[in-house]
Amino acid sequence: EPTVIDSEKRDQLDADITLHHLRSRTDVQTHTSWGAPIMWDGMFQADLYDLKHETDKSSVALTVFAVGRYLDAYLGAFLNSAEQHFMVGLPVKYYIFTDLPEKVPSLQLGPQRSLEVIRVQGHSRWQDISMTRMKTIADTIESDIRHHSTHVFCMDVDQVFAWRFGSEALSDSVALLHAYYYNSPKEMFTYDRNPKSCAFMLTGDFYYHAAVFGGSCTSVKAIAEACYRGILQDKDSGVEALWHDESHLNKYFWLHRPSKVLSPEYCWDPVLGQRQEIHVTRIRWAPKQYQALRPN
Ligand code: 2GW
Ligand code: MN
């Protein structure tokens, strides 16, 4: 049974959560210039966030694409690890988009957790697999997700949960700092620099990683639709953004700044090694198998 608390306690809870954001890490940037928290380990008490979201009856959809060879290569480890670490204690519904529904591994789901497999087309160009995700996500939020879940996260499949990825990550719109650029000067950010592309931008706040983004159903639908519109318009113009959907996502979050930012602890590449400010690795990139999985 979800805990019931009155509105005064609820306000106190929000105040405690905010105070903790402010008082915690001093070795890293904990807030954006527009006041959004950048969630580093130590900036939150997990039980306060869990109480808040149990009280709000938050529920979370997790969308992931596993098309072609990516299914066998990554989906089993992704889902098993999500069962251990993703939003434990809240209702979770996985949406698996694949061209091989019969090959989705069966797994024992925890209580209040369910899984739906949705068939999508394979694409001959890998850039199209990743770019058409945006349309599929927007359509599925409209037809299904918004009736079951308050929040959505959209993730790459080539990664594994290794530590709590919990309710502290929930907010209206959520972007992730890319592990390779969180501490780089802005000139290094790999934004799309082609003025003919809708994703074109000269400067921005951060370089965000498209492997994890999320928010409320309304916000994520707006994000995905805007990115897809940009991708389509680029096709009409005969151009393609440098990092495909990720370039369009960066442009969107520049024009519509996220209400919460996740530190690279939420999606770390072990190849980068150990760093003082990385206290935990909540998701780890799986080793890249480009030769085997990206024949063209
Ligand atoms: C992707 C590249 C080459 C060959 C195949 C694929 C592929 C991707 C595939 O065969 N099947 C498939 O399901 N995918 C899905 O697209 C899968 O969910 C995968 O995690 C996602 C993105 O592809 P990925 O992970 O190989 O690309 P990354 O890790 O370099 O992704 C970053 O850049 C992408 C755009 O190029 C996306 O923005 C992605 O969100 C970023 O993390
Ligand atoms: Mn990936």
Image (spheres, grey):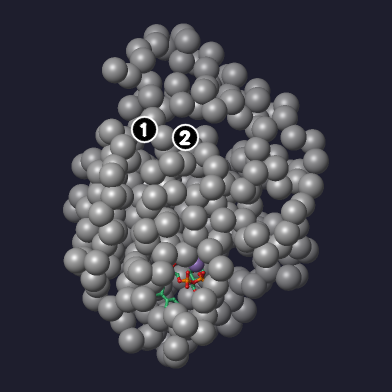
Query: Which quarter of the rendered picture does the N terminus lie within?
Result: top left
Q: Which residue is mark 2?
A: 167
In this view, 117 is above or below 10: below
Q: Observer-nearest residue: 109 or 9?
A: 109
Number of numbered markers: 2
Residue 253 or residue 16, whichever sits in front: 16
Judged left or right of residue 33, residue 14 is: left
For residue 186, what is the image quadrant? bottom right
| Mark 2 burial class by Cα count in 10 Å: few <14, some 14-19, many 20+ | many
Circle 1 SS class? loop
Residue 194 percent coordinates (x, y): 58, 82
Query: What type is the residue that disc 1 sits on?
Result: Leu
The local crowd at label 1, few if under 14, some if 14 to 19, many if 20 or more residues have their Cα within 10 Å, is many
Is residue 141 at least partly visible in the picture? no
- 157 vs 226, nearest the viewer: 157
Do labels 2 and 1 touch, CB within 8 Å?
A: yes
Secondary structure under tag 2 reads helix
Left or right: 149, with 47 as reference point: left
- Which residue appears at 40% of the width and 81% of the height? 126
Q: What residue lies at 28% left-to-right and 78% top-to-bottom? A: 122
Q: Earlier in the sequence, mark 2 or mark 1?
A: 1
Q: Residue 77's spot in the image, x, y percent?
A: 42, 57
* Residue that numbered label 1 is attached to: 90
In the image, residue 141 lies at what x, y percent? Answer: 27, 52
Task: Examine the rendering and report whether any part of residue 271 can be seen.
Answer: yes
Which numbered marker is on residue 207? none
Q: Is ligand 1 within 8 Å of the beta carbon of the residue shown at mark 1? A: no
Tag 2: amino acid: Ser
Above-or-below relation of 75 to 26: below
6 vs 262: above or below:
above
